[in-house]
């Protein structure tokens, strides 16, 4: 029996990969326009990095991490998210002293042991960004607007929800109000009863219908945030207004990671069933210091590439395919030889060129050129070649012209094609 891939681990094959490349190219371009630099970080880290940052009582740390003991006896974890590794790298490489405000992005696989379903995998991919070294509310607005722009430039429709989770100072007062409300709640699910004891804020994220119905009446965190957090949130909203980014305030949004403070946001869609979040993020002031680094504030977000790819399909957005400049169709051994060498020269000169080495009929080769969406076909026939000529056909308007076959025909073809 052949060996199959693991459950929740997927190949991305030609035909699909073009969508991924398009998503990545669009996002990279936007990241650079916003002056972000790429950072690449390892997939494997010490387990305590994630426990310390994401939080011991979160779903990710409690039940989703791929954690194992390596041959030296250390506990290692396949990264379930990108913020902790990027912050570790920021601290370890002293990036703070190189630039007061670091704007970083990274793209790559993440690992969570979840129940695989549409839009939910065990190895999935995120594009994530972090801004370290500033807590100006305009930066929050800019980061949210950047996430929004990615969705927009991909031609997708999603809605943006924002909230403020307050800070170390105001969270305790909200926790108190929430706990006294939860005291009155009835028949809460086992998970919520457990969360009440260890991390009450997390109950608001419960998916059970009975719990959710009751939480509609729960106190709003926005009524409990301190003056500083309130002003910050107002400025973020003002910033989003100035940038023309439409949003809705959702005071029940809590996010699944413990490190968030102040601004949090989610980009959501109704088109992917239960997997409604395509991207999410927020501010995490204090986290860098908590990981042993300088006391710098930070904000970031992560977008799921699987969900973006699914959404492109669902919302019927076209994905531009990579262009083929020329299909070299050679007929007969002499022409095949000539075409073989020419193809290589044209590729060296920067064109995308396809050639079939099997000397099939002209009809067959033209069909292949059509299927490949080639812009031009260069037809090298025995007879024409004997006269030192070849035919360059524009595949779109079918116009043809005669070109001289010379030692340096690359230049002539480049002139015609570019
Ligand atoms: P969900 O509520 O769907 O579990 P999450 O809150 O766990 O999402 P984050 O940790 O904020 O998600 O990750 C950011 C983004 O990464 C999500 O919005 C989603 O697009 C994507 N993502 C998270 N987990 C998965 C997964 N298991 N498979 C595919 N994409 C995922
Ligand atoms: Mg999750």
Image (spheres, grey):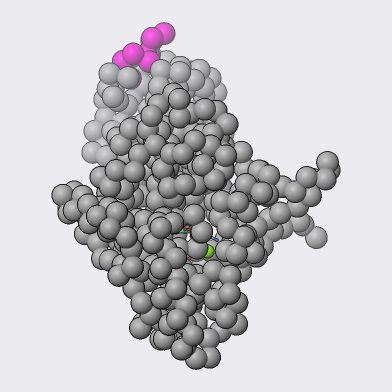
Looking at the image, residue 256 lies above or below residue 322 = below
Q: Could you tell whether 243 is left or right of 18 in the image?
A: left
* Residue 265 in sight here: no
Q: Residue at x 36, y 56 (%)?
A: 262
For the record, the magenta segment spans: 405-413
Residue 249 place in picture, x, y as percent: 28, 66
Looking at the image, residue 156 lies above or below residue 45 = below
Where does the C terminus fall, quadrant-wise? top left
- Judge by depth and name the residue closer to the eye, 178 or 376: 178
Where does the N terminus fall, quadrant-wise? bottom right
Q: Residue at x 58, y 74 (%)?
A: 197
Q: Residue at x 65, y 57 (%)?
A: 65
Identify the image quadrant of residue 213. bottom left
Q: Is residue 411 magenta?
A: yes
- Judge by depth and name the residue closer to the eye, 324 or 210: 210
Q: Is residue 90 magenta?
A: no
Residue 230 place in picture, x, y as percent: 27, 59
- How many marks on residues? 0
């Amino acid at each position: 029996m052949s060996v199959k891939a693991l459950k929740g681990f997927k190949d991305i094959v030609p035909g699909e990969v073009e969508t991924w490349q398009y998503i990545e190219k669009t996002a990279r371009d936007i990241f650079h326009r916003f002056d972000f630099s790429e950072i690449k970080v390892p997939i494997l880290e010490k387990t305590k990095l994630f426990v310390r940052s994401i939080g011991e009582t979160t779903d990710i740390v409690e039940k989703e991490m791929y954690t194992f003991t390596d041959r030296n006896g250390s506990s290692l974890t396949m990264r379930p998210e990108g913020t902790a590794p990027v912050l570790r790298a920021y601290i370890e490489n002293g990036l703070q002293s190189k630039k007061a405000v670091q704007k970083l992005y990274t793209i790559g696989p993440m690992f969570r042991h979840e129940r695989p379903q549409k839009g939910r995998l065990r190895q999935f991919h995120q594009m994530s960004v972090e801004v370290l070294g500033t807590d100006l509310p305009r930066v929050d607005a800019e980061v949210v607007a950047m996430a929004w722009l990615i969705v927009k430039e991909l031609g997708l429709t999603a809605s943006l929800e924002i909230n403020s989770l307050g800070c170390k100072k105001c969270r305790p007062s909200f926790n108190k109000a929430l706990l006294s409300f939860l005291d009155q709640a009835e028949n809460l699910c086992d998970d919520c009863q457990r969360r009440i004891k260890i991390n009450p804020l997390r109950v608001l994220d419960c998916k059970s219908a009975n719990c959710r119905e009751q939480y509609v009446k729960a106190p709003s965190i926005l009524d409990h945030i301190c003056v500083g957090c309130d002003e910050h949130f107002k400025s973020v909203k003002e910033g989003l207004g100035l940038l023309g980014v439409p949003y809705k305030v959702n005071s029940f949004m809590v996010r699944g990671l413990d490190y968030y403070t102040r601004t949090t946001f989610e980009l959501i869609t109704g088109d992917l069933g239960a997997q409604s979040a395509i991207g999410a993020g927020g501010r995490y002031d204090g986290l860098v210091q908590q990981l042993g680094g300088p006391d710098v504030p930070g904000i970031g977000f992560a977008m799921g590439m699987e969900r973006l790819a699914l959404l492109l399909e669902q919302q019927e957005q076209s994905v531009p395919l990579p262009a083929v400049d020329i299909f070299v169709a050679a007929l007969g051994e002499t022409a095949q030889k000539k075409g073989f060498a020419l193809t290589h020269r044209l590729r060296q000169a920067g064109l995308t060129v396809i050639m079939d080495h099997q000397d099939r009929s002209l009809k067959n080769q033209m069909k292949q050129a059509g299927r490949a969406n080639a812009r031009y076909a260069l037809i090298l026939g025995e007879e024409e070649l004997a006269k030192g000529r070849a035919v360059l056909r524009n595949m779109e308007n079918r116009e043809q012209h005669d070109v001289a076959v010379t030692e340096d025909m690359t230049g002539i073809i480049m002139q015609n094609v570019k």
